């Protein structure tokens, strides 16, 4: 049992290294993912910020959690793209014919998504600091924020894996991320939900992004988190488990 576990971890490390080399050879991937969220942050803070009533004097503090989720939603589309290319080129079938743990290939892509999105998040937080973002949170709240963002990344990455393995074209593999990128706009990421029409408000208050944004915002501002963090964790874990099951099924079908 221990030998099989070590074999899997070794194979997964090799697959992670393979995927990360693709990332570092093409740093424009991370740059492209960063550009849109940073542009949105600049636009909303310096153009729309004065007109938005968010109940805070420092709008970048209010805005940052939603921007981070948009960045992650943008970044996971590359996982679907890379998985689609591996499938189209027959690389997945080739790996399945080799003496390596079959799921290690998929986990390599998933962990690469986590690492690349962590890099993206760090870059955006640094830009936010230059724009005036400040946090009174201690080390534990920051670790909690990091944990939520990693869980959110894992959840969306497994969704991306389904798209990458099931898509019939490159466009189809990456287009699924567009609704995910749009979801923060119908949440409390940019404005309080109280200002929204009733139908929109009901949707915004009961979709996963709002609870995740509210939990991160409270942690970074040193405020009581309340039940939002448990709702956020439930959404992330629930989506991740369901997506994982369907992704593994789709992956196994490609190896048949």
Image (cartoon, rainbow, N blue to C red):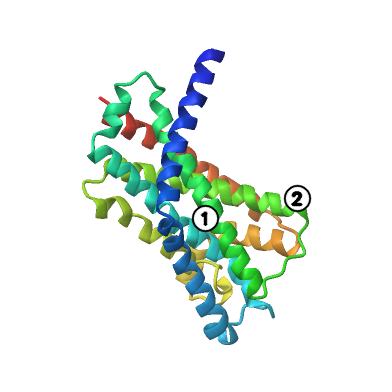
Quadrant in which the C terminus is drawn: top left
**Outermost residue toward the bottom?**
51
Of labels 2 and 1, the one closer to you = 2
Residue 61 appearing in the image: no
Instruction: Note whether 138 is above or below 202 in the view shown.
Output: above
Q: Which of the labelled discs sits on residue 72, or is there none?
A: none
Residue 242, x across and y down, in percent: 44, 39
Which image quadrant is residue 32 in? Answer: bottom left
Residue 221 appearing in the image: yes
First of labels 2, 1 by sequence position: 2
Instruction: Note whether 104 is above or below 140 in the view shown.
Output: above
| Residue drawn at x 55%, y 61% as measured from the top left | 68
Q: Which of the labelled discs sits on residue 140, or is there none?
A: 2
**Outermost residue toward the front?**
25
Residue 243, x across and y down, in percent: 42, 40
> Which residue is more in the foreground, 193 or 122?
122
- Residue with the mark numbered 1: 208
**Outermost residue toward the left?**
168
Instruction: Note whether 70 is above or below 44 in the view shown.
Output: above
| Structural crowding at the residue carrying mark 1, measured as other residues with C-alpha within 10 Å and reported as few (<14), some (14–19) or many (≥20) | many
């Amino acid at each position: 049992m221990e030998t099989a576990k070590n074999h899997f971890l070794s194979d997964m490390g090799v697959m992670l290294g393979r995927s990360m080399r693709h990332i570092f050879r093409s740093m424009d991937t991370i740059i492209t993912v960063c550009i849109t969220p940073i542009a949105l942050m600049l636009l909303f803070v310096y153009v729309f910020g004065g007109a938005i009533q968010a109940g805070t004097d420092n709008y970048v503090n209010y805005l940052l959690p939603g921007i981070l989720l948009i960045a992650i939603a943008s970044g996971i589309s590359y996982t679907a793209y890379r998985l689609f290319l591996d499938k189209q080129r027959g690389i997945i079938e080739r790996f399945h014919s080799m003496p390596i743990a079959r799921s290690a290939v998929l986990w390599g892509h998933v962990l690469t998504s986590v690492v690349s999105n962590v890099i993206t998040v760090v870059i955006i937080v640094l830009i936010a600091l230059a724009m005036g973002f400040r946090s009174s949170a201690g080390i534990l709240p920051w670790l909690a924020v990091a944990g939520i963002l990693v869980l959110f990344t894992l959840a969306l990455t497994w969704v991306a894996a389904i798209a990458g393995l099931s898509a019939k074209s490159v466009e189809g593999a990456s287009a699924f991320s567009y609704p995910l990128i749009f979801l923060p706009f119908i949440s409390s990421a940019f404005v309080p939900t109280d200002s929204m029409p009733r139908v929109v408000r009901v949707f915004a208050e009961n979709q996963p992004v709002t609870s995740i944004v509210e939990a991160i915002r409270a942690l970074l501002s040193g405020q009581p988190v309340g039940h939002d963090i448990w709702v956020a964790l439930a959404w992330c874990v629930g989506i991740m488990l369901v997506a994982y099951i369907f992704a593994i099924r789709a992956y196994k079908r490609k190896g048949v």
